[in-house]
Amino acid sequence: MKNLVLSAMIAVGASQAAGCIIVSDDTTTTGEGDLQVSWTLLSHTQAPPLSTVDNTVDTTGQCPAGSGTIRITAVREGDAPYVSDYLCSASGGPFTRLPVGTYTTWLEITDADGVTKFAESAEATVTVGDGTVTPVSFSLYTDRAVFVANWNLTRAGSPATCAQVGADKMSVLATVSGGSNGFDDDTNLCTAGVPPAVAFTQLPVPVGQSYTVVVSALNTAGDSIGDSAGIVNRQLTLGNSALDLGTVTVPIR
């Protein structure tokens, strides 16, 4: 990131009294700097059922109904959080007069009172310099979220490795509870979620609904060779979040 540095001026004056030269140092250092914050709200242009094949991102996402505020939080180690609020309908704004240092920052979409939260961005680390303006940008789904999980494979009741059973990738299929709309993500290699590793799905699914999730092992042809039991009533409520499914057991047939 490129900082815009404000220059300081030093004024020098001379006096003839007693033959002395007096130097005046007017340099001003405030120990503060600014952030220039911007954000992009994301959504999805496709109707369900969805897979990662047609995972089309829409960069004209809307502020969720009932929201109205973008809240930026900046935390410097050892300090109380600094908070700045903006209109959700804006695309950015200045976050001024932060003490110099390195901050962990994130964005939240809230209601006008900042009480109800609708979506939250990932964290970004930025350094504020003295008298500088530092840009920081966020992008986040306003109405969708993803799943995170790891898995254990078993065969005939005993632990098995991906290589032993010929498992290439894993499918995470989320079906709306009581409905038929499904969202199938098969992007992760089998080894990506073997404990202690965790895997994040890349297909964001709509929030505000409950899902039954099935994790399946796929062979190189993309066919299922084993399925977990249904993981029921998984509620997605916060946009851009990752709902942890925990460790899922996948019996191989």
Image: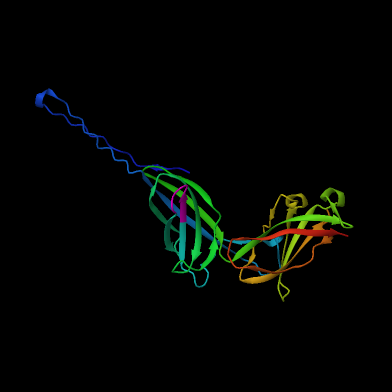
Residue 172 visible in the displayed image = yes
- Name which quarter of the figure residue 228 lies in: bottom right
Where residue 245 appears, x then y in whole percent? 70, 61
Nearest to the observer: residue 76 or residue 190:
76
**251 sits to left or right of 122:** right
- Name which quarter of the figure residue 182 lies in: bottom right
Tell me if residue 3 comes above or below residue 184 in the rendering: above
**3 sits to left or right of 241:** left
**137 sits to left or right of 178:** left
Residue at the limit of the structure toward the left, as seen here: 17
Question: Is 149 part of what is drawn in magenta?
Answer: no
Question: Is 79 part of what is drawn in magenta?
Answer: yes
Nearest to the observer: residue 138 or residue 61:
138
Where residue 122 appears, x then y in whole percent? 56, 55
> Residue at the spot x=64%, y=72% of the render?
209
Image quarter hosting the C terminus: bottom right
> Residue at the spot x=49%, y=66% of the render?
110
Q: Give the range drawn in magenta.
A: 73-80
Residue at the limit of the structure toward the bottom, as seen here: 178
